[in-house]
Amino acid sequence: MIQRKPAYKIWISQLSIGQMQKEPGEFGSQFIIVKDKNISRVSIVATVVDTFVKPESGFSSISLDDGSGTVNVKAFKDDLSLLENIKVGDIVSVFGRLREYNDERYILPELVKVLDNPNWELVRKLELINEYGKPEEIKDDGKEMIEVATEQGTVVEEVSGSSSDIRNRVLSLVEHAGPDGADYSKFAEVLKLSDEEIDGVLKELLSEGEIYQSRPGKYKVI
């Protein structure tokens, strides 16, 4: 029997620290190292700041903020029910496994529970301060220039590191779309992205207020 690894309480900002590593073997877990702990499963208590549901694609996600940073919780296919009825503003407790895709770290949920008492978030913050101290803001000032292909031609964009490539290609397409906005189908057609990549980036841009959905399937910059 494979023993389930412990779920560690951790600041969301700490999920970005260090390189994601993988245990040996085909089924080895992905993990990060924090204070000499190999962390592959986490326990997060935070506020829901955004939700994105697209049942027809078999994908749903929520964004969590614990005051130190934000992280996405992504559910696929059979696990979509875990994120049902979750609303922006809910305080939730999430147990799940760390995953990384296209340089984005996210949580694959095992259990998601809405907490009725908001004091639980304060209790968790006090626990984390006692364990790790107050969280430090993580900054990345590295810049690079990339060429983004859009329907109107090639545009040169400044981005923060290679992990911003897909995000900026999507944002550039929206910025250069016509008055009706960028159609959802164009992201796959023009940028050659998968549904998972498109959905993840659109959700992020929506949550940050960079774009808005003018009508179903149409996106514009704010």
Image: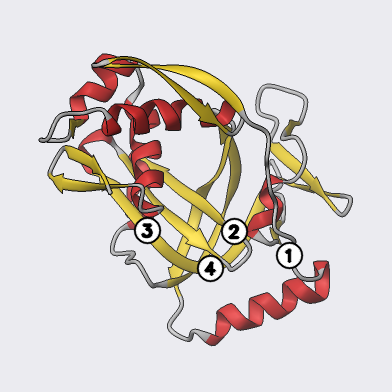
Residue at image mark 3: 50
- Disc assigned to residue 46: 4
Tell me what residue is drawn at x 59 percent, y 58 percent: 69
x and y, in percent, of residue 191 in the image: 33, 17
Labels 1 and 2 touching (C-beta < 8 A): yes
Query: Left or right of 220: which side holds 12?
Result: right
Q: Is mark 2 on a helix, strand or loop?
A: loop
Single out the mark in the foreground, 2 or 4: 2
Q: Cα distance, mark 4 to mark 1?
A: 14 Å
Disc 3 residue type? Asp
Labels 3 and 1 touching (C-beta < 8 A): no
x and y, in percent, of residue 52 in the image: 31, 50
Tell me what residue is drawn at x 55 percent, y 87 percent: 119
Q: Cα distance, mark 3 to mark 4?
A: 12 Å
Q: Is mark 3 on a helix, strand or loop?
A: strand
Disc 4 residue type? Ala
Crowding at mark 2 (Cα within 10 Å: few <14, some 14-19, many 20+): some
Disc 1 residue type? Pro
Q: Cα distance, mark 2 to mark 3?
A: 13 Å
Q: Nearer the viewer, residue 102 or 30?
A: 102
